[in-house]
Amino acid sequence: MKITGHIGKRKTSDIGSNSMLDRRDFLSTLVLGTAAITITPCDLQAVDGLSGAKRPNIILVLSDDHGFPHVGCYGNPDIKTPNLDKFASQGMRFDRAYVMCPQCVPSRATIMTGRSPVRIAMTRFSAPLPMDVRTYPEVLRTNGYFTGVAGRTYHLDGGARTPEMNEFFDKHELRTFEKRVDFCKTASGGPAILEQYREFLDTVPKNKPFFLQLCFNDPHRPLDKNAIPQPHDPVKLKLPAHYPDTQLIREDFARYYDEISRFDSDFGKVMEELEKRGLAQNTIVAFMGDNGCSQFRGKGTLYEFGIHVPLLVRWPGIVKAEATTDVLVSAEDLAPTFLEVAGLKPLPEMTGVSFAKLLCSEPFEGRKYVFAERGAHGSGGLPQNSAAFDLSRCVVSKTHKFIYNALWQIPYTPVDFNGDQFWKELEEMNASGKLSPEISRIYFSPTRPMIELYDLEKDPREFENLAGKPEFAGIEHELKWALTEWMIMERDFLPLPVPAGAKAGRKNKAKGKK
């Protein structure tokens, strides 16, 4: 079943409909726990006051640094993911899901709040989520749900890695997440995470709906050797089109696939536990990568491998089996979607667009654009290269991507593997002239373009920059102004990507729905 949805337009005034006055009035008058109950879009989950008898349980499973299309169900014949493939056949596969940041902390902040990292001051990797920024689990909790986070760290209590910072965080009570949910624990490694998952299910009060965000380590670096009994063969793998081809790179990429396969096995056990407890039929399960893969032009960049992620959703009896959609979806859309399927109205300050109607096969007015940002990375160290610090923004449409690099003067440095042997070997090959001019330009240019424009349909590698070419002036103008309007409404601190005195043309000015 193929679902495309309807792509509508929205005026600039609509993008900013939650004005500062509206938000201030809302926050000053809202009493925690009085979120209005509504009927879910399918009219199949009737809500009786705050009774949770018929409301669905919700589980969000996050893999770590897992990019699109690295699941078998996306047409990838090389990777071994039988459990995720089976899961996809039972629900909906999203082909155009994007995160709002190619790094875990800001991306997870977006998932939890339904808002952009820029708007909620979470672009700095080590920042704790401000207490006055509400999360959707808090809304669920105050309206009858038992809520929790488990597994790999949820990343939203800040990166206090020195005694002085720990003291400061304690003094000002900056670690807030234990106050936001009923169950707040972390674990590392599949067996420990699965045990914590079972502990959560044991703790849920009888006849109470629950929400759980369950996080796994895989496939985050460092990548383990022999992560699975039958590892992927480096020689037989088809490398992505934008990759250099060396033996060390193939071995690294095979280990990345191995860790995804290990996660797949753990995911299968998550689903088995639901079946064993009789919970599967009334539980919405969503799986998503928390951000793109730590691979070439991936994590830490705004290219497709950095922000395009797998997303699968199963809701027995509601989401039709083997459904697929190419509707643009942003990670900020999860929060309002989960609230709506629980019979609750999204918070007014949430900028995400609920796709609950899409899940129910109802007419759905989707997005015209998705947006993403890149800021500081890591909890320690100084901004010595683009791996540690960068300032970029992008907008993605159905066919094109526009990237704005505010720090265009600094070269590309990969996140998480710039010290690995395969990258060092590549640096040596570049220095000795052994790389093709194309690969050398993409990975080792001393500077980057300030503006990048790519046709994602004709150039999925994102190698041919169309910015500045007269024949693409119209689409460049449209996307530039769409990004500019978004940056203004999000109170972005970066200079806008337009020259002083520039004016938007009446015909091309972007007025589309986000």
Image (spheres, helix red, strand yellow):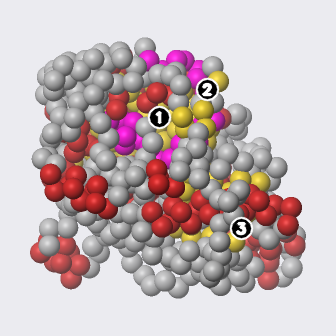
Q: Is residue 398 positioned above or below 163 on the image?
A: above
Q: Which label belongs to residue 473? A: none
Residue 161 place in picture, x, y as percent: 29, 75
Q: Earlier in the sequence, mark 1 or mark 2?
A: 2
Residue at screen point 31% across, 18% down: 45
Question: Circle 2 is placed at which residue position?
Answer: 3
Which kind of residue does numbered mark 3 sit on?
Answer: Glu
Question: Circle 3 is placed at which residue position?
Answer: 452
Mark-to-mark CA distance, 3 and 2 = 30 Å
Residue at screen point 15% across, 39% down: 34
Q: Report helix, strand or loop for mark 2.
A: strand
Inspect the magenta stretch and tell me whether residue 304 lies in it: no
Q: Is residue 385 positioned above or below 79 on the image?
A: below
Residue at screen point 85% across, 66% down: 470
Which kind of residue does numbered mark 2 sit on?
Answer: Ile
Which kind of residue does numbered mark 1 sit on?
Answer: Phe
Mark-to-mark CA distance, 1 and 3 = 30 Å
Q: Which label belongs to residue 355? A: 1
Q: Nearer the viewer, residue 132 or 488?
A: 488
Q: Nearer the viewer, residue 345 or 282?
A: 345
Q: Is residue 153 positioned above or below 145 on the image?
A: below
Residue 129 place in picture, x, y as percent: 28, 62
